[in-house]
Amino acid sequence: MRRKNMIRLKLLSFSLCFLAASSHAAGVVGQAGLKETVDNTIQPLMQKYDIPGMAIAVTVNGESHFYNYGVASKDTRQSVTNKTLFEIGSFSKTFTATLASYAQANGDLSLADNASKYLQSLRGSSFDGISLINLGTHTAGGLPLQAPDNIENTDQLMDYFKHWQPAHAAGTYRKYSNLSIGMLGMIAAGSMHMTFEDAMEKKLFPELGMTHSYINVPPGQMQDYAQGYTAKDVPVRVNPGVLASEAYGVKSGSADLIRFIEANMDASRLNRKLQRAVIDTHTGYFKTGEFTQDLIWEQYPYPVELKRLLAGNDPAVIYQETAASRLNPPLAPQADVLLNKTGSTNGFSSYAAFVPAKKIGIVILANKSYPIDQRVTAAYQILRQLESQAAVKNRSSGGDSKHLSH
């Protein structure tokens, strides 16, 4: 009897070792396959557009992976790392939206209030009928993409806002606008009795666990700030104007940014108010064109076809207005969706996308301007590989098998 028990124990031990070895091997193969997919996607893209450096961060089931290529500067030849600081352009707007949502969770403001409630100089203007939600969804009535060239300071900007007349009733059209999200950022920071830069660098970033992200890069961190390049290879960095900080001013690296994406899919590690703030930015307020407009994030039903993502991220969506239909009540945050946001400055490009239901996400950063459709396509191809890895784990744990449409 004792001999039989010994044999059973040996067999059990062998089985457990075999299963552990098989699991480890599957993980190694999965990571190797993912790296091959990223390499095969990113390296041709860099060659085609002569991109000096790129940083790719992906997350699957809470695990982050980093892939760095090329150099942060053609002059110094410094290699790109997880800490290399890129200008993320309008991807910054998602942080501004999060700050506004955080201010609401803290009781400093209500997104349902009209903008003029928080900016006294605008009382009696068109902003009496434009809510903070309108500002955060580009549905204020036709605010332009950029401020007029003759506006150089806040007083001039407020005078412009006071006399501005909307082309449409608030909430009826979407027109992408730096001024719109910029005003929301001003109001959010003001409600917290802070400058916008301090609200981001001393409050929001630290509470998100982002330790190497800035509006104004400190002198001691300038060695990590990549050099940007225009499409014609001219060295350039962002030239701040009015509302630049609020609309497109964040400089960050792939390690911090993928942490932000992970927080958007699982906010449980954040404090209670910040959890609420992050989740609330996924509320759908308007249906417009190919997507649902959340608080800055653009949301697509899942699964989604590449051609729909490309249509939703077409430059025309930035430069042209689109009819918008208010969702009443607003659409509660969803899991079976893909949320994304692009970003650009003259010398940098970014793209982020994630699928909460699958716990997969990606951030793509480059120190050169190149077409948006190329970023979206590259991210989509890599997300398919991430989805495959997630599907294997889901099947082993009895999960579902919904997928991206190929």
Image: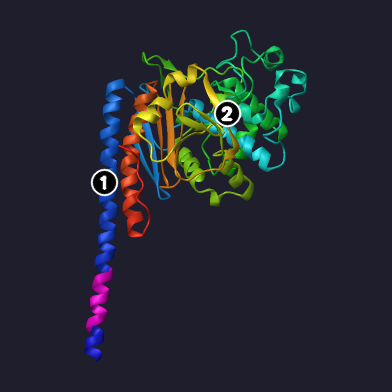
Tally of marks: 2
Residue found 64% across the figure and 33% down from its top: 198
Residue range of the region highlighted in magenta in the rendering: 7-16
Q: Nearer the viewer, residue 80 or 291?
A: 291
Residue 208 at x, y = what percent? 56, 43
Residue found 30% across the figure and 31% down from its top: 42
Residue 165 placement, left or right of 53? right
Q: Earlier in the sequence, mark 2 or mark 1?
A: 1
Looking at the magenta stretch, what is its main secondary structure?
helix
Disc number lying in front (2 or 1) = 2
Residue found 30% across the figure and 26% down from its top: 46
Q: Nearer the viewer, residue 31 or 390?
A: 390
The C terminus - image quarter: top left
How crowded pointer 1 is (Cα within 10 Å; few <14, some 14-19, many 20+) is rated as few
Real-space Cα separation, disc 2 to disc 1, in angstroms? 40 Å
Residue 139 at x, y = what percent? 59, 24
Q: Quadrant of residue 295?
A: top right
How crowded pointer 2 is (Cα within 10 Å; few <14, some 14-19, many 20+) is rated as many
Does the segment drawn in magenta span residue 10?
yes
Residue, disc 1: 32
Residue found 24% across the figure and 92% down from its top: 1
Residue 273 placement, left or right of 376? right
The answer to whether 94 is drawn above or below residue 159 in the figure is below
Residue 231 placement, left or right of 41? right
Three-letter amino acid code at disc 1?
Ala
Mark 1, secondary structure of its residue: helix
Residue, disc 2: 137
Q: Quadrant of residue 143?
A: top right
Q: Quadrant of residue 310?
A: top left
